[in-house]
Image (cartoon, rainbow, N blue to C red):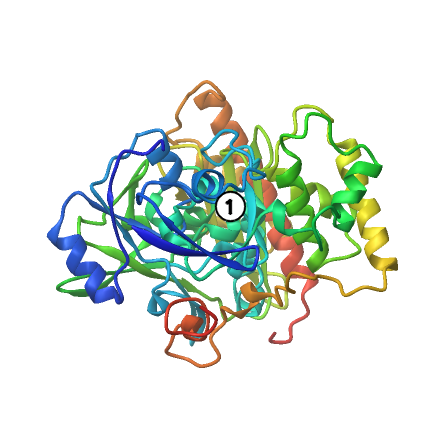
Amino acid sequence: MKVKLNVNKRVREADVEPRKTLLDTLREDLMLVGSHAGCEHGVCGACTVLIDGEPSRACLMFAVQDDGYEITTIEGLAAAPGELSIVQDAFCETHGLQCGYCTPGMILTAHALLTRNDAPSRDDIVEAISGNICRCTGYGQIVEAVEFAADRLRKTNAPRDPLRAPADEAGKADASEKGVLGGAHIHGPGGGRL
Amino acid sequence: MKPAPFDYVRPASLAEACEVLAGDEDARIIAGGQTLIPMLAMRLARPARLVDILRLNELRGIRSDDDAIVIGAVTRQVEVERSEIIQRGLPLLLKALPWVGHPPTRNRGTVGGSIANADPSAEIPLVAVTLGAEIEIANPSGRMGMPADEFFIGPMLTSVMPGDCVTAIRFPVWAHPRVGTGFHEVSARQSDFAFVAAAAQVAIDDAGRCIDATLGIGGVGDRALRIDVTALVGKEVAQVSISDVVRAGTADLEASSDLHATADYRRRVAAALGTRALEDAFAEARSRNGAVQ
């Protein structure tokens, strides 16, 4: 099946079997190998990508389902080649990684958290990364990296999210009137953003 | 690629989805996929065809009806967490949601998917049973509603027939001004499968007397169960021992034993968490002033 995927603001086409996950498609067809294959059944979080700005597991989605979404991988975070995003840089500064296998997922999850909340508490950070497993760092320096990135983001004069502000898409499921379900204006072919 | 091959179809309407499902007994519905895709990856499920309903707008959204809140089946769990309608009318569901998976799986996982999957330790089915929700189902011959305690019949087992599609869940909203809720769970790690979970909702009058109370226990047996706590109704909370009522109600619970917890442990924890959930609920109800919200 042919599918058009909007990855890192570029529309890319791939011809894939329906059973091919978004993760495998990113890695094998689009050569975006920054999304890592860990457990491949939704436990570890190494394959985390952003779908419309929200962290999701690329191993728990099939590529044929994903046309119309804005997909962001770790390759799409930095402003320009050779540069690092604020969150990426904070992970380097605080040694928030050792082997690096979980790092792309951690950074994307942290990026999404800080887009919604630039002053997260330690608990907010721990809850946000609770679905991402790290077997090296003991998490201490990862949490520190996210706190450091939050601090830098608050002090920066640049626009908060160069990718997109998710504008709380998920807050829009409430129907405004009785008798109909509210999803008609967003999500889905023919309706709204897609 | 780990799953076995399958065909993929994305119907444009619920009617079309029902037709495809009715015409192919090896077809299965996929919505958020957060449970189904791991099952496919491990080849525990091998459907010939996946029918993707995630983008059917007629199945998505949250609306307030007179005495109920209706959540479309493909409404994502994260959308419920951020919904003002839910915050106002279904605080018990809101308390349960942080226990459902992790934030990234709640971004994709749907409410209807959790209901249809019928995991005995799942939180959303527990809340549905506790509140006496109605599950709305469509098939080619029409639509029907089914009470949650008839819908769930065993572990990962529901009354849904091949060709049926869960379309929405109707959660009753209590009209009493002073309603309180409580939710407690024990698991190996937060967000892991519950060994035991307890959900409670109570209403009291201005004199502090209990008008209504419901308690549900999940993770203990083969499905979430409602515990008889009618002994609390009509009494002032100070006059009765909540733990006695809960212990009496949970004494005969059929509990399962596994690697993680024995049946006896599960029964004892059910009584303790049930008591705690009710105590929290009464405390919250007392803290509300009498004005209608």
> Which is nearer the eye, B117 or B243?
B117
Please report the residue visible at 71 percent of the width from the left and 61 percent of the height from the top: A161
Residue B240 visible here: no
Residue B126 visible here: yes
Circle 1: element type: helix
Please report the residue visible at 49 percent of the width from the left and 68 percent of the height from the top: A173
Count of numbered badges drawn on the protein: 1
Q: Quadrant of residue B13?
A: bottom left
Image location of residue B138, percent across then percent down: 22, 62
Chain ID at mark 1: B
> Which is nearer the eye, A86 or B3?
A86
Q: Quadrant of residue A189?
A: bottom left
Q: Is residue B53 above or below residue A177?
A: above
- Quadrant of the rendering where the C terminus of chain B is positioned: bottom right
Q: Which residue is mark 1?
A: B105
Q: Is residue B88 above or below residue A11?
A: below
Image location of residue A79, percent across then percent down: 71, 55
List the single residue furthest toward the front: A81
Q: Is residue B58 above or below residue A114?
A: below
Mark 1 belongs to which amino acid? Thr
